[in-house]
Amino acid sequence: MKVAVCSTQPYDRESLQAANAAFGQQLVFFEERLSTKTIALFAGYPVLCAFVNDRLDAEVLQALSDQGLRLVALRCAGFNNVDIEATQRLGICVARVPAYSPHSVAEHTLALMLALNRKTHRAYNRIRDGNFSLHGLLGFELSGRTVGIIGTGRIGQAVAEILRGFGCNLLAYDIAQNPACSALGVNYVGLDALYRDSDIITLHCPLNQQTRHLIDAAALARMRRGVMLLNTSRGAVVDTAAVIGALKSGQVGYLGMDVYEQEGDLFFRNLSEQVIQDDIFERLLTFPNVLITGHQGFFTTEALASIAATTLENIRNFEQGGQCQNEVTRALLR
Ligand code: NAD
């Protein structure tokens, strides 16, 4: 099938082309992101291969459907950027890659946690500047600390497995308990108890109507003073303005983010020659206890190969049967 690949980076092209040797799809690569402004570029393709910041809202979908779009093959797990109601109304199938090495994101979460705690990002710069003072680099032992995990699906479980090895006490909140986590000794509690008792809180739930701004000013106020907050799920699970307030007051002691509410205007591009217009993001960069990465949790060789293979498998399933395993159905819209 003719597949328009949106938001292509060189590594996407490489991994999709390598995997496509076994599938033989006609892949047409575009660097542009899909939005109302770029619809015309992507018109006329039966399949769109989209990523996290391509905007597939009702207007975009209607226009592309009129031009023959039948399948949106997301090369990611989250689907919050797609108006699923609109795709169902228009008869467009949406498939995703529900699981591709949850360890990639889990390990990146640990990288943020360890760096923030032991301040390796600051130590790196200090040593290069000939400053060998330890002042301000004091950390704490993870062993014996309590970590609260919100969302214990594939990634949350992988985080729990790693943290168990560090000797952490594990609390969790999820709308559905994962028996594998319970078997690890994870203690499921309500959000109030998780906020109250956790030294570190890490987010691994999807972005949906229930979780949008789950971490708002009220939630932050219920957390332990000086809590470490980690978000590698989706930016809008956290109310960024509220978290800036909590960083200023010291209520949040550390913030690690791989995702950001307005990341669509920033991430995956080199903007180093431009003046960044997002004042909220720029304010975050001024805190010494904030560590931000640009949505790279998924970015490992293993995950890229797995994403490419599953995406192409989804397209082949659709081509052969008009249906897809890994279809985003209404049941997933909780
Ligand atoms: P998953 O579907 O396996 O697990 C999600 C878990 O969240 C499930 O257990 C679900 O019951 C739970 N959940 C749903 N609604 C909830 C709510 N209201 N409160 C608490 N828990 C709730 O998904 P996953 O593979 O573990 O991925 C989790 C999220 O990580 C994805 O939705 C995606 O947004 C994000 N992600 C980020 C990256 C990255 O590069 N940073 C990569 C992949 C996925």
Image: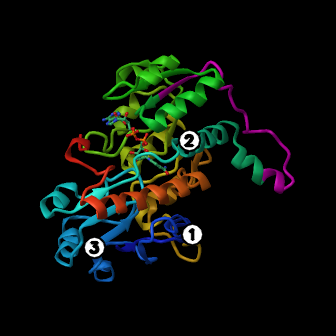
Secondary structure of residue under mark 2: helix
Residue type at mark 1: give it.
Glu
Q: How many marks?
A: 3
Q: Position of residue 120 (x, y in %)?
A: 72, 44
- In the image, taking residue 94 as reference, residue 147 lies left or right, namely right
Q: Amino acid at mark 2?
A: His
User: Which of the pair 205/213 is nearer the observer?
Assistant: 205
| Residue that protrudes farthest toward the bottom in the picture | 40
Q: Mark 3 is on which residue type?
A: Pro
Q: Is mark 1 within 8 Å of ligand 1?
A: no
Q: Which mark is residue 14?
A: 1
Residue located beneath label 3 in the image: 46
What residue is at 48 percent from the left and 17 percent from the top? 183
SS under mark 3? loop
Magenta stretch: dominant SS? Answer: loop
Q: Find out whether residue 22 is within the magenta segment.
A: no
Question: Observer-nearest residue: 178 or 83?
Answer: 178
Res 25 quadrant in image: bottom left
